[in-house]
Amino acid sequence: ISGSLFDFAVETLAPPTISWQSRLREYARNAAEYVRGQGDYSYSRRSRFQPDGCGVIYPGSVTPIPEVSILVDTSGSMSNEDIQRLLPEAQACLRSSAGSMGKVCVCDTKVHSLKTVTDVRTIKMGGRGGTDLRVGFAAIGKVKPRPDILVVFTDGGTYWPAQALRGTRTIVALCGRCKVNPDSVPSWCKVVDIPNNK
C-alpha cells in the first residue's frame, strides 16, 4: 500500500473530533436531563385530572430543577489564563440550573469562596497555594440543598475523596499545563480532557 493511500485511509477512518466545549456541555445537559426525569407527585400541586364532585384531592406531578455547583481549582499549578479561559464554560454549565444560578466554590488547600452566583465572572479567584480539593468537596457536601451536578475545573493534581458526594453527578474538566492523565481521576467522575492549545 502506498504512503499516500495509507495516509488517506488513516485520515478517513479516524474518529470524529469533538470539541471539549461540546463534550462538557453534553455531559452537563445529560446530567440535568437525568435529574429532570426523576419526576414525582406532590400535593403542593393539584392534579389536572381532578374528578368533579369528588372530595379527594389528587397530587399533581412535579419535575425537579437540577441544582448545579462548580468547584474551581485555584492552586499555583493553575494559571490565570487557564482559569479565565474556563469561565465561559462554567457559566454555560450554570445555565442547566434553576434561574441560571448555582454555588461556586473557589479552593486550593482551603475554601476561599463559596457563594451562590448568576455570573461566575464576579467571583474573586483567591488561592495560588497547594492543592487538596477534598476540602472543596466537603464544603459543597454541606450546602443545602446538595447539588445534583458538580462540575470541577482542575488540573487533577490533587487528592480525591474516596467516593462521590451522595446523589451528585460529578464532571471533571481537566485543564492546565500541569494536568494529569485522565485515568488518574476517580471512576465515579465523567472526565473532559481540555487541550492546552485550544
Image: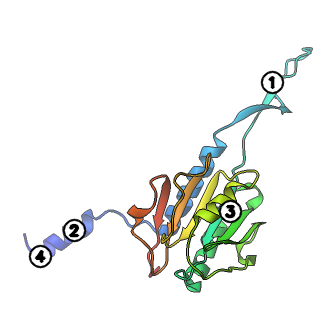
If you read the primary sequence from the N terminus, does the residue marked by circle 2 or circle 3 appear first? Answer: 2
Q: Could you tell me if residue 10 is visible in this image?
A: yes
- Residue type beneath disc 3: Leu
Q: Position of residue 5 (x, y in %)?
A: 14, 71
Q: Which residue is mark 4?
A: 3
Rounded to the nearest angstrom, the CA distance separating label 4 from label 2 is: 11 Å
Q: Secondary structure at mark 2?
A: helix
Q: Which residue is mark 2?
A: 10
If you read the primary sequence from the N terminus, does the residue marked by circle 4 or circle 2 appear first? Answer: 4
If you read the primary sequence from the N terminus, does the residue marked by circle 4 or circle 1 appear first? Answer: 4
If you read the primary sequence from the N terminus, does the residue marked by circle 3 or circle 4 appear first? Answer: 4
Q: Nearer the viewer, mark 1 or mark 3?
A: 3
Q: Residue shown at 69%/50% (left/top)?
A: 66
Along the line of sight, the residue nearer the viewer: 56 or 122: 122
- Residue type beneath disc 2: Val
Q: Which residue is mark 3?
A: 94
Rounded to the nearest angstrom, the CA distance separating label 1 from label 3 is: 35 Å
Along the line of sight, the residue nearer the viewer: 83 or 41: 83
Decide: marks 3, 4 in contact (CB < 8 A)?
Answer: no
Decide: marks 4, 2 in contact (CB < 8 A)?
Answer: no
Along the line of sight, the residue nearer the viewer: 127 or 22: 127
Q: Position of residue 39 (x, y in %)?
A: 69, 36
Q: Which residue is mark 1?
A: 49
Rounded to the nearest angstrom, the CA distance separating label 2 from label 3 is: 39 Å
How packed mark 3 is, by other alpha carbons closer than 10 Å (few <14, some 14-19, many 20 or more), is many
Q: Secondary structure at mark 3?
A: helix
Rounded to the nearest angstrom, the CA distance separating label 4 from label 1 is: 69 Å
Q: Nearer the viewer, mark 3 or mark 4?
A: 3
**Quadrant assignment for the N terminus:** bottom left
Rounded to the nearest angstrom, the CA distance separating label 2 from label 1 is: 59 Å
